[in-house]
Structures are given as structure tokens and as C-alpha cells.
Amino acid sequence: MRPSKRAPDELRKVSLERAVARYAEGSCLVKFGDTHVLCTASLEERGPPWLRGTGRGWVTAEYSMLPRATLERTRREVTSGRPSGRTHEIQRLIGRSLRAVVDLSAIGERQIVVDCDVLQADGGTRTAAITGAWVALHDCLAWMKARSMVQGEALKDHVAAVSCGIHAGTPVLDLDYAEDSSAETDANFVITGTGGLVEVQGTAEGKPFSVEELMALIELARAGTAKLVDLQKMAVM
């Protein structure tokens, strides 16, 4: 039995609340159970210098965790002068995931920055961030399209992410902290609305996992992200 009493293929309660930040072109408060992440999408009129003259734009992300998002206060990374390796990895992951479903030439030489701030953490902050970031990005692009700033359809597909793992010998979907901290295998999957794999991260915490176990996790992830995409579709209707 899972600590949360959920079935092996059951997501936590998920909600996607749009337009929660007054000044951002797009925003979403995403909740995966007790993990809460605020995602805001901001339009910048100038893209990165290396894209100047190409006619293409850019989508990138920044990620941070508030000091009391966890049980004990963590130091703000700004006080150390640079983001940690974990933070750098996560924000690069979010950016890659979003760019996988955006036609960068459609937005011109502009940049969209999606900030993902963890208000409360209970496992799966990066997967919640990606899922909510897509909604914030969608609304930012809609804002741009309403002002004739987008050529054609910039957003090519949905993208969502979910964690999976092997806990007490059983493949399970959407790990909370209690499961994540004691899982034998922990994995994150980023998958598009059409079922394409954007990124797979998997680690054995002890005993190596088998190909059969990996395939079981992939099937759980595909079903889980399909449900998350359905929730994204309902959120932006």
C-alpha cells in the first residue's frame, strides 16, 4: 500500500489555476497534491544575442524554491551569488521541455521567460513546474496573438511531465516526498500531447532496475501525462 493510499496508477489531486499574477502575460498556479508551483510567463521584446538577425525567438525558464517551501528553511540562492547545480539542471529541463512544442520562428526575435517558483514542496516540483509552465506559456502566446505579434500557430502541442518510481517493489505514478525519499527507483518523464518523449530521467537508488520495470514506468507515465494534458485542455478552454 502506498503511503498516500493511492492506487499505483493514480495521480495526486491536480489543479491548474490561470491568470493568478496580475502583471504577467501568462500565469498558472499548479498543484500536484501538496506541491504548489507558481508559473509566470513574461514577454521580452529582445531575444538572446546569439539569435540576433535569425528571425527566431527563444523560450527559457528559471526555477527557484522559496525558503519555507520545505519543512525547514532553506537559504535563498541569491545570497550565494549563483543557482545550485540542482536548480540549474531543473530550469534547463523546463526550458527544453517548452521549446520542444514551440515554433520559435513564429514569435519573431523575442524571448519568453517562464519563472517557476515553488511555494510548497512535497515531491515532483520539476514535473509540476513543467505542466503548469505550459499553461502560462499558452496564455502568453495567446496574449501575443491577440496583438498580432505571432505569425501562425506558435504552440505546436501540449507538454506535461510526471514522476514514476518503484516503491516497495511496485511501479507507481506521481511520487510524493514520502515515496520519493524511499523509492528503489525514481524517474521523471516529459511527454507531449501526441505521446512523444521529450526527456526521460531515471535513477536506481539501490538495486538496478530492469528493462521490464522501465517499460512499466513508461506506460504509467504515458497514461499519467495523458490525464495531465486533458487537464491542461480543460484549463485553457
Image: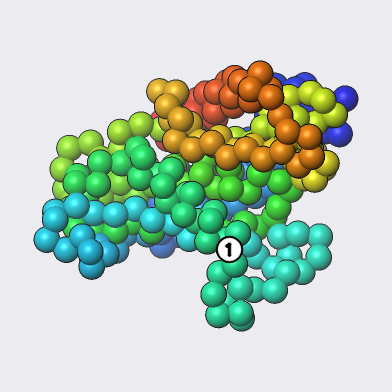
Provide residue 160's location: percent of width, then percent of height. Answer: 50, 35
**127 and 203: which one is in front?**
203
Q: Is residue 217 above or below residue 112?
A: above
Residue at image coords 36%, 40%: 100
Q: From where the camera sits, is residue 45 visible?
A: no
Quadrant location, the N terminus: top right
Residue at image coords 41%, 62%: 23
Q: How many marks?
A: 1
Secondary structure of the residue carrying tag 1 is helix
Q: Residue 111 is drawn in which quadrant?
A: bottom left
16 displayed left or right of 148: right
189 displayed left or right of 34: left
Q: Residue 47 is drawn in which quadrant?
A: bottom left
Q: Residue 102 is drawn in which quadrant?
A: top left
**58 and 204: which one is in front?**
204
Give the residue number, with chain letter if any, for mark 1.
Answer: 85
Provide residue 225's location: percent of width, then percent of height. Answer: 54, 28
Provide residue 7's location: percent of width, then percent of height. Answer: 77, 21
Provide residue 25's location: percent of width, then percent of height. Answer: 36, 55
Q: From where the camera sits, is residue 237 visible?
A: yes
